Image (cartoon, rainbow, N blue to C red):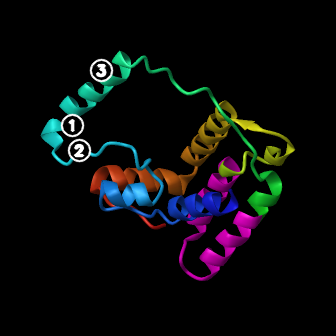
Amino acid sequence: IYNLTSQVFKNIALAKVCTSAVEGQYAGYFRMSDGITFDKARLLHEARKHAIGLAERGYHPPIPRSYKLFGESGIATFRMMVSALVAGGQATAHDGVVATRLAEVLCGGIDGAAGPVTEERMLELEVEAFLSLCGEEKSIARMQAMLTTNKPLRN
C-alpha cells in the first residue's frame, strides 16, 4: 500500500495533469472499468444510460471501507520527500505546505496507524485540510489566479 500511497501523493503534490481519460486511468485517477465518452455532446446521454442500467440491475452503493494507513510515521516520510522537492527547486515553499496537508490526509492523520481509518474519517481530514488551506494567503492567490486566468500560480 505504501507504493500506491506514495504514487498518489506524488501525482497530487506535483499537480500531475493527465491529457486524456485513458492516461488518467493509468495514473490511477479512474478505474480501468470506468466508461469513457469522447464526444461531449453524448456525455449526458451515456451517463443517463449507465445510471438506468445500474438501477435495473439493482445497484447498491458499496459498503464503506476502512483502511490501514501509516499515521505519523508516514507523514514524517512524506515531509522528508516534500523537503527534498522544495530544496531541489521542484516545488515552492507553499507547495510544501499543501503537500504536507495532503500527506496528513493520505496517512489518516497523526493517529492513522493506531487502527483502521474509515472513509468518513478520511473525508473529515480532507475537509479540515482544505478549509485550513483556504485560510492561507498564498492558497487564496492560487485559487483567484486559476479562476481569473485559468492557469495555475506557482507562488
Q: Main secondary structure of the magenta part?
A: helix
Q: CA distance from mark 1 to mark 3?
A: 14 Å
Q: Residue at x 21, y 37 (%)?
A: 43
- Residue at image mark 2: 37
Can residue 103 be seen by looking at this rendering? Answer: yes
- Residue at image mark 1: 43
Q: Nearer the viewer, residue 20 or 148?
A: 20
Q: Position of residue 20 (x, y in %)?
A: 30, 58
- Residue at image mark 3: 52
Marks 2 and 1 in Cβ contact (< 8 Å): yes
Helix, strand or loop status at disc 3: helix
Q: Nearer the viewer, residue 70 or 150?
A: 70
Q: CA distance from mark 2 to mark 3?
A: 17 Å
Q: Position of residue 127 (x, y in %)?
A: 60, 37
Helix, strand or loop status at disc 2: loop
**Magenta-drawn segment:** 77-105
